[in-house]
Amino acid sequence: MFDIELSSIVNAEELAKKVSPDSLKTKTEATIDYITTSNPSELLSDLLHQAIVFGLKVLAAFAIYIVGMWLIKRLRKILRRSFARKGADPALASFVDSLVSIVSIIVLIIIAVGALGINTTSLAALLAAGGMAIGMALSGTVQNFAGGLMIMVFRPFKAGDFITAQGFSGFVEEVNIVSTKIRTVDNRIIILPNGTLSNGTIDNYSQAFRRLEWKISVEYGSDAEKTRSVIMSILGDEPRILDASVPSCADPVVYLSELQDSGIQFTVRAWVKNEDFWSVYFSVNEKIYNELPKNGIAFPFPQLDVRIKSQE
C-alpha cells in the first residue's frame, strides 16, 4: 500500500516537472516562432489537419462514452436479473449494483480521456494522488464504505428485516456503498451511515418466532392459583400462541414474580410467530382486562394508608 502511494506521488512530481514554467515558456516560444515563420497557406492547412484529427478524437471519445454507458446499463441489468433469479438478498444486490456502477464509470472516463490522446498514465497518477488527498479529507465516507463491506460480509440483517439501530426503528429498504435506508412504521425514510451502523448495536426483530411477555398486577388478597388458572385459560383460548411442540418455542407460563407496594405481580410468557407478535399482545391484553374482574380478581391502584394518632 505504501509503495503504491509513494509511486503515485513520484509520478505526480514527474508530471509537475513536465509542466514547469520553463518548459511551458520554451513550448510557447517555439509555437510563436512556428506561426510567424510558416507560410500562411501551409499554416492554415496544418491547423485544419490538426482540427480534423482532434475532432475525430473527440467523436471517438464521445462514441466510447455513449457505448460504454450503454454497456454499463446492460451489465447492471444483467446483475439485477441474476440476483433476482437466484433469490439473493436485495440489500446485497443494491450494494453490488452501486459498487459496480461507480467503478465502471470511473474506468470508462479514463478510457474516454485516453481516446483524446491524453496520457492516461499521468492522469492515473494524478487520480491516485488526488484520491489519497480526497480520502484523507473524506475519511468519514471511506469509513462508511468499509462499514458497508462489513455489513455485506457478516450480514447482521437483510432487506425486509425490522431493526432498531442508532435510535431508529424500521424495515430495511436497501444497503448501498455508504449508507443503509430504513422505512419506519409511520412511513418515514431514515438514512443511516454504514460506518456508525456497523460499529454500533443492531437489534434485529425479524426472527421466525418471538416470545411475548406481560406484567400483570392484582391486588393483595387475590387467590394466586385462581389468577394463574384464569390467565392460562385465556392463553389456551388463543390459537396463535405456540407450545413446546414447535421447535425453538416453549409452553406458556405464568409466574408470581413480584410483591409490590400496592399488589402482587404475575409475569406471563408465551411464544408466537413473528408476524403475530403485536396482534396477539394487544388481544391478550384486552382479554386479561375483561376476564380477571369477571372472576373476582381486581387490579390494584396506588394507595396510601394514613393513621392519625391523637394525643390527649
Image (cartoon, helix red, strand yellow):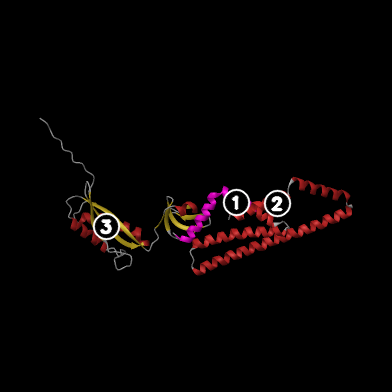
33 to 90, vertically: above or below: above
Q: Nearer the viewer, residue 307 or 195?
A: 195
* Residue 170 in picture, x, y percent from top left: 43, 55
Can residue 73 be seen from the camera position used here? yes
State the CA–CA distance, disc 3 to disc 1. 58 Å
Which one is earlier in the sequence, the residue at label 3 or at label 2? 2
* Quarter of the image with the C terminus in it: top left
Q: Say few, some or many: other residues with alpha carbon within 10 Å of mark 2 (under 14 / 14 to 19 / 20 or more).
A: some
Q: Main secondary structure of the magenta part?
A: helix
Secondary structure beneath dot 3 equals: strand
Query: Quadrant location of residue 297?
Result: bottom left
Question: Does residue 268 belong to the magenta stretch?
Answer: no
User: Residue tagged by mark 3?
Assistant: 268
Could you say which disc has been placed on residue 132 in the image? 1
Residue 245 vs residue 9: left or right? left
* Residue 294 in picture, x, y percent from top left: 21, 56
- Range drawn in magenta: 127-155
240 to 219, vertically: above or below: below
Q: Amino acid at mark 3?
A: Val
Q: Amino acid at mark 2?
A: Leu
Question: Does residue 139 belong to the magenta stretch?
Answer: yes
Q: Say few, some or many: other residues with alpha carbon within 10 Å of mark 3 (under 14 / 14 to 19 / 20 or more).
A: many
Q: What residue do we see at 82% from left, 47% from top? A: 29
State the CA–CA distance, disc 2 to disc 1. 17 Å
Q: Nearer the viewer, residue 32 or 256?
A: 32
* 3 vs 2, front mark: 2
Secondary structure beneath dot 2 equals: helix
